[in-house]
Image (tube, helix red, strand yellow):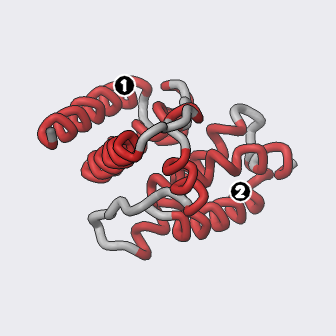
């Protein structure tokens, strides 16, 4: 049952853990711990939404890990693997070829700017942005994962977008 419920969502679990912890190494630790928790708790799976159940475990594991291993302010660091960094250097968004070194520099600077802006958001705002915009979850699933009402998800997402735009606007 574990193979059918948790394992199909490993890539998303890793991506969420990477955004919450700020780096690949810590994300691997979190996902490994989350997988163990999921394996031990698979009997409690109510056959509702496997994706939301799995990502909830990853989220909770990440916050437990952060509380134990990091100070209260979480620093967002380089969240791309070397292969992803190399891919960014060679290809642009949606795999389109970047033709000039200037375009590459602009794209990398923009990506870094967005990453830094995301890092400035409080964790509860950052997580709803990641879950909605990167994992493309719906409000109901985000509410289930974060254990807050849908209205709270919508208001946090709105506020997170405002803060992100304000931070990005102040950098230009």
- For image coordinates 47% across by 37% down, the residue present is 99
Are there few (<14), some (14-19), or many (20+) residues within 10 Å of tag 1?
Answer: some
Relative height, residue 55 to residue 129 (above, below): below
Q: Nearer the viewer, residue 164 or 125?
A: 164
Q: Nearer the viewer, residue 62 or 119?
A: 119
Is 73 situated left or right of 58 in this image?
Answer: left
Is 1 situated left or right of 23 in this image?
Answer: right
Q: Which residue is mark 2?
A: 38
- For image coordinates 50% across by 57% down, the residue present is 80
Q: Nearer the viewer, residue 142 or 93?
A: 93
Quick one: label 2 or label 1, which is nearer the N terminus? 2
Q: Secondary structure at mark 2?
A: helix
Q: Quadrant of residue 34?
A: bottom right
| Numbered mark located on residue 2 in the image | none
Q: Nearer the viewer, residue 130 or 35?
A: 130
- For image coordinates 67% across by 49% down, the residue present is 11
Res. 9 visible in picture: yes
Question: Looking at the figure, which quarter contains the C terminus?
Answer: top left
Res. 118 visible in picture: no
Relative height, residue 150 to residue 27 (above, below): above
């Amino acid at each position: 049952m574990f193979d059918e419920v948790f394992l199909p969502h490993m890539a998303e679990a890793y991506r969420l853990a990477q955004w919450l912890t700020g780096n690949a190494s810590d994300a691997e630790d979190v996902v490994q711990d989350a997988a163990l928790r999921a394996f031990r708790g698979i009997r409690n799976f109510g056959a509702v939404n496997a994706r939301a159940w799995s990502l909830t475990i990853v989220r909770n594991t990440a916050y437990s890990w952060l509380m134990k291993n990091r100070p209260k302010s979480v620093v967002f660091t380089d969240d791309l693997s070397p292969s992803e960094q190399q891919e960014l250097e060679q290809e642009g968004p949606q795999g389109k070829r970047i033709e000039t070194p200037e375009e590459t520099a602009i794209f990398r600077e923009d990506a870094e700017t967005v990453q830094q802006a995301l890092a400035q958001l409080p964790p509860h705002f950052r997580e709803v942005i990641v879950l909605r915009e990167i994992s493309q979850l719906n409000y109901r699933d985000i509410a289930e994962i974060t254990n807050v009402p849908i209205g709270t998800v919508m208001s946090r997402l709105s506020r997170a977008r405002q803060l992100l735009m304000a931070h990005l606007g102040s950098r230009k």
